[in-house]
Amino acid sequence: MLALSHWPPLDRPRHLAAWADAIGHNHAALWIGCRGPRVVAAMLAEVQPGRTAVVGCPRVAEGEPSETAITVLTHVCDELRQSDIRLAQSLTLKHLPRDGAVLLAAGFEASCDLLYLVSLSGTFPSAPPDNDLEWIPYETAGHDRLRSMIEQTYEGSLDCAKFQHRRSLDDVLAGYRAVGTLDGARWLIARQRGVDVGCLLLADHPDSNAWELVYMGVIPGARGRGLGVALARQAQWLAAFAGRERLSVAVDADNGPAISAYAAAGFTGWDRRTVYLRAFA
């Protein structure tokens, strides 16, 4: 409960259940700092596919200085580095501005602000979008073709550009696969007039009756044609066809073209968080 004390009291049981499940499946760990028999700090860290770890900023007992949190976080990062983790990330909440100072002192860098957007079922198209795009599922396209397409869409991308090349593309793809319930039919290459121009990766979250737009991208030579809106509308249509109530996405707050495309497709914002990253050599 100390590690989750930054959440509102009504939200803590839900987060506690989620973390307990992750710890039970050996995906996560609870770290504590003690002075003698007294617990003075606690934090949670989850190891994810793609050699990435998501870490929470340590919470400290009343009267403990911020240096206690820095010491615990630094120790945990050293352990993660030794276990072949390549990138640790932490997302700070708006009402906890001091977390940023702790993360920076422990070697993290502020990467970007993420906007969390959502599209509710009322904004979904009632029929397949009318455009000249052909959709090739991952199962048909194959791994190498999709990998090449994603690599091309990263060129000149405005999404977390500062840390874009800190992980291998195979690690990034492993992270994408771990989101929600994976189905190769929801990973798509967009083809226009015989040319692969973009990709759309979607994940299902049955427990919340929602889909997530994990990633979408357009190759540099096809940008400026409105394909971002077309990709977003296709994602909405597929979510509607599956009977889901909403579609969510996270986007870099500095990625103006992507935000404009989502807004044109009917997405609205519901949260904003700062991403802190620490890359290990």
Image (spheres, rainbow, N blue to C red):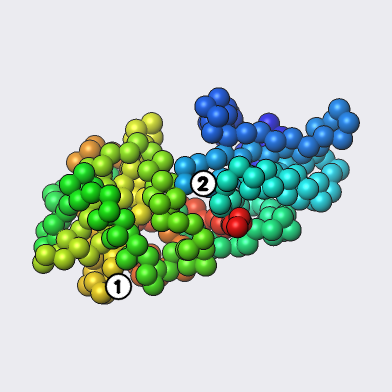
Position of residue 49 measured from the top left corner of the image (x, y, whole percent):
47, 42
User: Quadrant of the rendered structure where residue 215 is?
Assistant: bottom left
Quadrant (top left/top right/bottom left/bottom right) for the N terminus: top right
Position of residue 233 measured from the top left corner of the image (x, y, whole percent):
23, 56
Quadrant (top left/top right/bottom left/bottom right) for the C terminus: bottom right
15 vs 82: above or below? above
Q: Is residue 93 visible?
A: no
Q: Is residue 114 visible?
A: yes
Which residue type does callout 1 highlight? Answer: Pro
Position of residue 166 measured from the top left corner of the image (x, y, whole percent):
51, 60
Q: Residue at x 52, y 27 (%)?
A: 25
Q: Residue furthest right?
A: 36
Position of residue 164 measured from the top left corner of the image (x, y, whole percent):
47, 63
Which residue type does callout 2 highlight? Answer: Arg
Q: Residue at x 16, y 53 (%)?
A: 135
Asked whether 64 or 7 is in front, the reply is 64
Q: Is residue 125 left or right of residue 24?
A: left
Asked whether 98 or 198 is in front, the reply is 198
- Circle 1 — which element? helix
Q: Is residue 179 left or right of residue 232?
A: right
Q: Residue at x 37, y 65 (%)?
A: 154
User: Quadrant of the rendered structure where residue 239 is?
Assistant: top left
Give neighbour class at mark 2: few <14, some 14-19, many 20+ (Cα, 10 Å). Answer: many
Question: What residue is shown with label 2?
Answer: 51
* N-term-proximal mark, 1 vs 2: 2
- Give the number of the mark in front: 1 or 2: 2
Q: Residue furthest top?
A: 24
Asked whether 218 or 250 is in front, the reply is 218
Question: What residue is shown with label 1?
Answer: 220
Give the Cα separation between the discs numbered 1 and 2. 28 Å
24 vs 234: above or below? above
